[in-house]
Image (cartoon, rainbow, N blue to C red):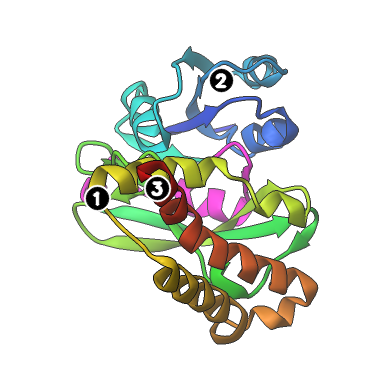
Amino acid sequence: MVKIPISAVLITKNAEEHLARVLAALAWCDEIVVLDSGSTDHTCDLARAAGARIEHQDFLGFGPQKRRAVALARYDWVLSIDADEVLDETAASAIGALPFATLDPRRAFAIRRRTYVGTHEICHGVWNPDWVLRLFNRSAANFNDNKVHEAVVAAGPVERLAGSMHHYSFRDLGDLFKPGYARLKADRFLAEGRRAGTCKLAARFAWGFTRSFVLKQGFRDGPAGVVVAASAGLDSVLGLALAEEKRR
């Protein structure tokens, strides 16, 4: 296999469920860096078996943790993948066709993310379309410092690549309601001094649900579309509500 001179970087903690196929889809990368934050399952064993370099760092929040992973890479061109995202062959081929030796470092590339609940793809609603910037040169771009909802900040044009990342974050619909992200957002809202009363929270929830279920046609996903829309509404208010609770 011809290796492409880029570093694939992942952050992990107890990520064994999908990790083997995530890493297998990155075998064409010249380097894979796995930054682990205390896994107690088989995550590190799977990474080692796939030929990845394993580093360790206590969790700093998603943005700072991913910045640390990027800093550990050997190459300036970095492909950031989450431990539940499987890159398909079309996307791998599109990346492999790029002329990295002469590529303008200010260019960055987004990949379409397709999200599943169990084995069912959610094709409508607030998650679609979902283009995420994941391939970039660290001399000109990097993740921001947001501890939740982190993103890569690019210095130049962002282009879209062919292919997809298949995102297996949820085992079932109940998995959509996890409070961990909201607690991280609450800490940020407290630091920023953001406030939200009852009426504002209710309006935000209604808009989040309506946007996903009606405007973005989440109803076409059936019962799953209802739950995805409800989770979108909850996501828009829970962090703020927790911040208000802590403030009191």
Query: Residue 192, image x and y in percent?
Result: 24, 48
- Residue 243's label in the rendered image is 3
Q: Residue at x 28, y 55 (%)?
A: 194
Q: Is residue 172 left or right of residue 32?
A: right
Which tag is nearer the camera, tag 1 or tag 2?
1
Between residues 55 and 98, which one lies in front from this camera angle?
55
Magenta region includes residue 211 = no
Q: Which residue is mark 2?
A: 52
SS type, badge 2: loop
Q: Earlier in the sequence, mark 1 or mark 2?
A: 2
Magenta region includes residue 93 = yes
Label 2 – label 3 distance at C-alpha: 39 Å
Between residues 154 and 149, which one lies in front from this camera angle?
149
Q: Residue at x 45, y 40 (%)?
A: 80
Query: Residue 208, image x and y in percent?
Result: 51, 73
Q: Which residues are magenta?
A: 82-106
Q: Is residue 189 left or right of residue 105?
A: right
SS type, badge 3: helix
